[in-house]
Image (tube, rainbow, N blue to C red):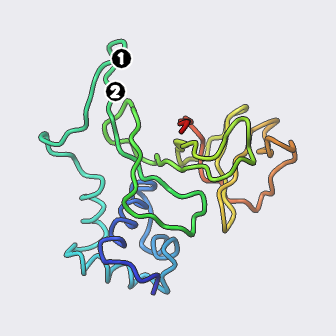
C-alpha cells in the first residue's frame, strides 16, 4: 500500500483530490495515491471513521456552516470570496497533503480549481520558480490561453497557438501523449 504516512495525511490527500475533481472515482483516487487497489481507499476512509466515499465527498464539498463561511466582500457590486484551494507540488509524485492556497473567487465553493507551485525557471520570463498557478480542470483550451499539462514526473506549461498546445520557449507542439490537466486562470508571483 502507498507510503508510510500518518492516517490523517491519506484523508487529507483524498480530500485534496476530491476538491480538484468532485467527480473523481475511488479507482482514480487509488491510482493517484499509488495504492495497489481501491480497497485501500475504503480502508483509510473507515480508519478515519467515514462511512464511505459519498459521505466523505459531502463532507469535503458540502455546505459550510454559517459560522465558518468564507470571508466575502464586493467588487463593483459583485460578491467575491476568499477560498482555499489544494496546493500541489510541481512533481505530482510528491504528495504534500493539507497544503492550501488562498484565492479570491466569485463563488464561495468553486469546483475543479487547484493551485500548483512552479519549481523551474524553464518557462522564464512568463513563469518562474515559486510562482503559484491557479488551474481550472476542464477540456476547453481557447486560442492564446495558457495550459497545464503533465508527464508522469512533472507538470508542463503550454500555450495554445493555432489550436495546438506548444512549448512557449521552443514553439514546438507538445506531445499528444501529455495529459491535459487544465487551463491556467491566474498566476501569483512573490518575490523574496
What residue is at 48 percent from the left and 67 percent from the top? 95
Q: Total label count?
A: 2
Could you tell which of marks 1 and 2 lies nearer the N-terminus? Answer: 1
Q: Are marks 1 and 2 in contact (CB under 8 Å)?
A: yes
**188 left or right of 21?**
right
What residue is shown with label 2? 80
Residue 4 percent coordinates (x, y): 41, 83
Where is residue 7, by image quadrant? Answer: bottom left
Q: For the residue carrying disc 1, how many other residues have a C-alpha within 10 Å: few (<14), some (14-19), or many (20+)?
A: few
The numbered disc on residue 186 is: none
Q: Residue furthest front?
A: 192
Residue 110 percent coordinates (x, y): 38, 42
Q: Secondary structure at mark 2?
A: strand
**6 left or right of 117?**
left
- Quadrant holding the N terminus: bottom left
Residue 98 percent coordinates (x, y): 36, 60
Q: Nearer the viewer, residue 141 or 159?
A: 159
Q: Nearer the viewer, residue 110 or 88?
A: 88
What residue is shown with label 1? 75
Q: CA distance from mark 1 to mark 2?
A: 7 Å
Residue 108 percent coordinates (x, y): 31, 37
What residue is at 40 percent from the left and 56 percent from the top? 99
What residue is at 54 percent from the left and 58 percent from the top? 89
Amino acid at each position: 500500500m502507498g507510503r508510510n504516512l500518518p492516517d490523517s495525511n491519506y484523508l487529507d490527500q483524498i480530500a485534496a483530490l476530491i476538491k480538484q475533481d468532485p467527480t473523481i472515482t475511488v479507482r482514480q483516487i487509488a491510482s493517484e495515491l499509488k495504492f495497489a487497489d481501491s480497497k485501500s481507499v475504503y480502508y483509510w476512509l473507515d480508519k478515519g471513521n467515514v462511512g464511505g466515499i459519498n459521505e466523505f465527498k459531502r463532507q469535503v464539498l458540502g455546505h459550510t456552516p454559517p459560522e465558518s463561511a468564507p470571508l466575502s466582500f464586493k467588487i463593483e457590486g459583485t460578491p467575491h470570496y476568499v477560498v482555499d484551494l489544494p496546493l500541489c507540488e510541481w512533481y505530482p509524485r510528491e504528495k504534500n497533503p493539507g497544503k492550501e492556497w488562498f484565492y479570491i473567487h466569485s463563488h464561495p465553493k468553486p469546483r475543479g480549481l487547484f493551485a500548483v507551485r512552479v519549481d523551474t525557471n524553464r518557462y522564464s520570463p512568463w513563469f518562474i520558480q515559486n510562482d503559484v498557478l491557479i488551474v481550472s480542470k476542464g477540456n476547453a483550451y481557447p486560442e492564446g490561453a495558457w495550459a497545464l499539462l503533465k508527464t508522469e514526473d512533472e507538470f508542463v506549461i503550454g500555450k495554445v497557438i493555432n489550436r495546438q498546445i506548444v512549448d512557449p520557449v521552443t514553439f514546438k507542439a507538445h506531445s499528444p501523449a501529455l495529459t491535459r490537466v487544465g487551463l491556467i486562470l491566474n498566476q501569483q508571483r512573490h518575490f523574496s
